[in-house]
Amino acid sequence: MHRIHNYHLADQSEWDVIIIGGGATGLGTALDAASRGLKTLLVEQSDFAKGTSSRSTKLVHGGVRYLAQGDIGLVKHALKERGLLAQNAPHLVHKEEFIIPCYDWFSIIKYFTGLTLYDWLAGKFSFGNSKYLSKQKTLNLMPGIKAEGLKGAISYFDGKFDDARLAVNIAQTATEQGATLINYMKVVRLLKQGDAVVGVETEDMITKASFKLNAKVVINATGVFVDEILQMNNPDAKKMVRPSQGVHIVLKKEFLNSESALMIPKTTDGRVLFAVPWHNHLLVGTTDTPLDEHSLEPRALKEETDFILNTAGAYFKIKPIEKDILSVFSGLRPLAAPTDANGNSTKEISRDHKLMISAKGLITITGGKWTTYRRMAEETIDLAIKHTGLASKACQTQNLKIHGVLMVDDDNYLNIYGSDRTNIEALAKQQPELQEKLHPDFPHIAAEVVWAIRNEMAETVEDILSRRLRILFIDAHAAIQMAPKVAKLLAKESGADQSWEQDQIEIFDTLANGYIYHAAKKETQAS
Ligand code: FAD
């Protein structure tokens, strides 16, 4: 899958479906549409999963918190989707044990009861039963948590994944099903005939070429950007989305020193906080901060990182401090705003998705969760078929395997590529110079970069270090150190000159500085 190979837009007369947005929702929708035999195009203004879909807590889950809020239907559907994802993408979705440490007996009873209900709701898609752990067992499994006053813990099972990697693999699956997907292609205008939307005008963000593309139905799957598309249709359209920012920090895994994840069940703002082992590090988050504006690179507020450090610090034996933060990133929840949007707390706003026909020929889908992307896509294409009368099959995705599907039993880090692992190894064998490591502290080799350029539509240093390899999200300083090697490989593969290579490094450094915690950044500059 290469961007240029997909680039035969100009000669297409009419698409059945054009999808705007290459996050979880749009990619899932492209896969659903193509697998039903529809002529499908997806355009993404940046890279796949550049938006919220690379910035999640990495949980494939029913949502224990929504259970506490009594949203049983939402949890049950999500648990089924969790099971389907584990079945269709076992190389990316893994079972994880979550530990809720309890410092009073009442909590033990309360969480055991709630999580037993959670297991029961999963039915045949259960990941395993919740159980009580004694104090000693808890500390054996998670030596990094505070022992003082600990009565024991409740352990339950949920799913963990790599969000941006799943996005890339869904994009590849959609391509294999016949869809055309193009990154760095932005919708700048909707084409209209009277009140009906009949296509889109796009601008290539790299070449600046523009295209007018017709479709029987246009699907707006742009996450927190949905209102911009809706306003292209009707400048007076009421806002559908209220963004809510969620921040994560990444620490060394030694803070918990555990294979299991920590779940802090009640924070001072009435939420939950997770500390999840992820790519040999510890991902801790998140927050829920209502915002009035949105962007592709939202920035964490100091009060959000303080909140995460303090909340985790109350449970960790060694309290993490600012200079321990290896990377900090934030994402925006495209929460569906209620029709009478006047509340300030986004916690009150629905976590379920919102699907609507916005105009003749324009469908909008937003909200929901990564976990439920498949079901959201199914509902969207069902509606599109009903709305346009397109001839098509029933949904095919319940048992459709995701690109790379493979069950593996060793713990090689390349397993995240699933069946592509052997291709990357073969590439490194053919060209031994590609066995070179990108950084002494990380296992990644040059062959992965070349693979991403040739097969995963990676166009920039950022695409590779942020979303193909996840280094920027794991350790921003290390990512900056890797950038020159990655830029060189990119320039060589694409035949670009040295000034392009230099520009790529500079652009990436500026971006990556935003992932370095502020106080730490000052220290680095001073030293
Ligand atoms: P996005 O991923 O934002 O995609 C929208 C895309 O549209 C963007 O890539 C954007 O560039 C593109 N776009 C916008 N305008 C245009 C245009 N004019 N032309 C072309 N393209 C355009 N869910 C879970 O299941 N598990 C979790 O653990 C979890 N954790 C989360 C933690 C946080 C902090 C947040 C914020 C969300 C979390 N979620 C989680 C929810 C999940 O991440 C989102 O529901 C999901 O990623 C939304 O995907 P999306 O495709 O709708 O939006």
Image (cartoon, rainbow, N blue to C red):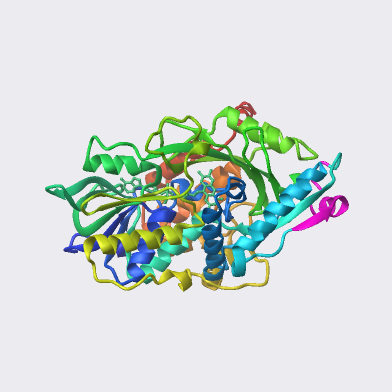
| Residue 139, percent from left and from top | 84, 50
Q: Is residue 35 above or below residue 283?
A: below
Q: Is residue 162 above or below residue 345?
A: below
Residue 404 shows in the view:
yes
| Residue 267, percent from left and from top | 66, 36
| Residue 510, percent from left and from top | 47, 36
For the C terminus, which image quadrant? top right
From which residue to which does the magenta span run? 131-146
Magenta stretch holds residue 135? yes
Magenta stretch holds residue 374? no
Residue 433 shows in the view:
no
Drawn side of residue 288 relative to residue 311, left or right: left
Q: Which image quadrant is residue 361 in? A: bottom left
Identify the residue shown where x is 88% and y is 52%. 136
Of residues 376 and 49, the one drawn nearer to the viewer in this rendering: 376
Q: Is residue 386 above or below residue 256?
A: below
For the N terminus, which image quadrant? bottom left
Identify the residue shown where x is 31% and y is 56%. 19
Looking at this view, name the residue that lies furthest to the left: 194
Q: Which image quadrant is residue 383 in? A: bottom left
